[in-house]
Image (cartoon, grey):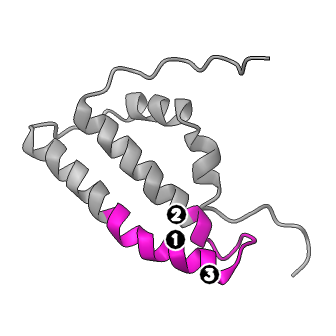
């Protein structure tokens, strides 16, 4: 059985696509570091070490957008791209898990 076909990505500039990719890299690492979620310290440590490089890449992607004159963030378009790339699930791992009622 074939997986469902994803909707197409909206039209993005190369710089916008790079920002989205680098942002999701950072989000994925933050999700692995999140102390409110199950995991081990070594995995969190490795993710924290990688975070520096990924945050730098995100900064560089944003700086490139700015240098190219792309000074406005088209939030609705970028949000659609994030949804196509499973951004809702990926960003949810950064927040606290649902409260279970125990301390």
Q: Which mark is residue 47?
A: 1
Q: Earlier in the sequence, mark 1 or mark 3?
A: 3
Q: Are marks 2 and 1 in contact (CB under 8 Å)?
A: yes
Label 3 Cα neighbours within 10 Å, binned few <14 / some 14-19 / many ≥20: few
Q: Which mark is residue 35?
A: none
Residue in the image at 49% along x and 18% along y? 8
Q: Which residues are magenta?
A: 31-55
Quadrant location of the N terminus in the rendered image: top right
Looking at the image, residue 48 lies above or below residue 79: below
Residue in the image at 59% along x and 76% along y? 44
Residue, disc 3: 42
Looking at the image, residue 64 lies above or below residue 103: above
Q: Which mark is residue 29?
A: 2
Taking 65 as reference, is 34 left or right? right
- Which quadrant of the view contains residue 95? bottom right
Label 1 Cα neighbours within 10 Å, binned few <14 / some 14-19 / many ≥20: some
Taking 4 as reference, is 12 left or right? left
Of the two numbered discs 2 and 3 in the rendering, the one whose residue sits closer to the viewer:
3
Q: Confirm whether the magenta stretch covers residue 49.
A: yes
- Which quadrant of the view contains residue 60? bottom left
């Amino acid at each position: 059985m074939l997986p469902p076909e994803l909707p197409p990505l909206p039209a993005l500039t190369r710089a916008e696509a790079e920002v989205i990719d680098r942002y999701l890299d950072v989000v994925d690492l933050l999700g692995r570091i999140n102390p409110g979620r199950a995991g081990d310290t070594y995995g969190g440590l490795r993710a924290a070490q990688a975070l520096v490089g990924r945050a730098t890449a995100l900064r560089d992607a944003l700086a490139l957008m700015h240098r190219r004159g792309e000074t406005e963030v088209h939030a609705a378009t970028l949000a659609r791209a994030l949804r196509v790339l499973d951004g809702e699930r990926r960003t949810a791992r950064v927040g606290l898990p649902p409260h279970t009622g125990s301390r």
